[in-house]
Amino acid sequence: MASFEHIVSEITAALWGWPTIVLLLGTHLFLTIRLRFPQLKIFKAIKLSVTKDKDSHGDVSQFGALATSLAATIGTGNIIGVATAISLGGPGAVLWCWITGVFGIATKYSEGLLAIKYRVKTSDGTMLGGPMYALERGLKMKWLAVVFCVFTAIAAFGIGNTVQSNAISTLLNESYGISTYISGAVIAFFVALVIIFGVKGIARVCGALVPFMALFYVIGCIVILVFNAQYLGETVALIFKSAFSPQAAGAGFLGSSVMMAARFGIARGLFSNESGMGSAPIVAAAAQTRNPVRQALVSSTATFWDTVVVCALTGLVLVSSIIAHSDIDYSDGAKLTQYAFNKIPYVGSIILTVGLITFAFSTILGWSYYAERAIEYLAGKKLIKYYRIIWVALIFVGAVVDLSLVWNIADGTNALMAIPNLVVLLLLSGVVVAETRKYLWSGRLDDYDDTPVPRI
């Protein structure tokens, strides 16, 4: 088993080498510049995200699609993922994670736009879309669409399934002594109850769960930052310095190379916000929206909330806690978060437990939808019921296996899934610019796109 873990770790490290990092960050920067910094429209996008387009085509509201996307992205990557990045890459990983989020807003915008532009409708009226349809219809590269769906179906078992159940079971076991077998069984049971209702059921649950869980967790982070207020200046300075200078780690941190800080920060940033991975546009395609740009703006808010807000707060909490409390063991990402939140008298452990359980549970729901759409593209609906059985079974398996192996597998499959999607974004960036010019830059954001949605 140790040899297998070493092999997986080496493969993952190779996948997250400079070529992948340059491709991902390069795409973020390229789209940011070519689209004239869509990050500046974030407040308009937030307003649109809670505005209904009732007369538009789609299966769920724009907020429902956003909630499902946020449910899939705001998960253990925001909590355990950031902690793991710090323990492996040093405090500088927090800055790289945040940078990935800021520039990733442009990429998430582009993904949402292409999802609507190239979506299709089934005979029963269900909307389907995502990178696979953009590859097939926009680039005539069905073979790469198949590759993307294969990677999506595999990646889902890591980022959207086993990692999430593992995080819940580990926390409950270490905090309350609850058997990982019991946790795994309970999680699997409740997920099974929700996913049988499809995207509308998932969207309803996520729409109710996401605002509550995010607000609850953010308040907890703010409380810790109040306790650590005297260390915040040192925390911010350390994060910035160590992102570019390994010698600047200090404060008890082990030295970490700039490459390690960048690798783990960017990898965890992608794991957290999924900008460039190609997952979020799969559910964005189901949104009721009057034109592709409106949904693009709504989709971009997911990265803002996920990384620019939640991950940044987590990073500040963890690094400031390490500086403030010399007894915190930061070598274990999972335990680091527990130590930090336990510093809140009486309720710290409860805040972390509720936050992590709701984050992880909702992520499992969101990713179950992504995985099913990938399976449907590859083999039609006939295999979905069997895939659901496997999905629920692996929730239990993930709850009882070693975390380090699960994280390594998840990181590797994330990279494999992202590459075909980044090809789509780069080669179809001209389409994204044309649609943006038509609706956003010309002030016609309220216009309807009357182009008929193709039936399959």
Image: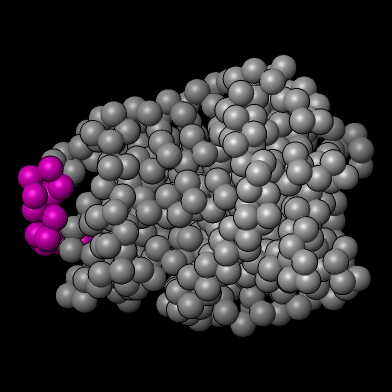
Is residue 229 a member of the stretch shown in magenta?
A: no
> Which residue lies at the image location 78% right of the left edge and 58% below the top edge?
343
Q: Is residue 153 left or right of residue 65?
A: right
Q: Quadrant of the rendered structure where residue 86 is?
A: top right
Above or below residue 349? Residue 327 is: above
Above or below residue 144? Residue 41 is: below
Residue 288 image point, x, y percent: 27, 68
Is residue 439 a member of the stretch shown in magenta?
A: yes
Residue 95 image point, x, y percent: 56, 34
Q: Which residues are magenta?
A: 438-456
Residue 116 image point, x, y percent: 27, 55
- Coloring applied to the structure: one colour
Q: Is residue 428 left or right of residue 91?
A: left
Quadrant (top left, top right, bottom left, bottom right) of the C terminus: bottom left
Magenta span: chief secondary structure: loop
Would you say residue 38 is visible in this rendering? yes
Q: Nearer the viewer, residue 124 or 35?
A: 35
Q: Quadrant of the rendered structure where residue 392 is?
A: bottom right
Would you say residue 120 is visible in this rendering? no
> Which residue lies at the image location 88% right of the left edge and 63% below the top edge?
174
Q: Residue furthest front?
A: 230
Residue 102 image point, x, y percent: 43, 39
Q: State the count of labels.
A: 0
Above or below residue 317? Residue 453 is: below
Q: Nearer the viewer, residue 218 or 355?
A: 218
> Which residue lies at the image location 56% right of the left edge and 32% below the top edge?
96
Above or below residue 378? Residue 143 is: above
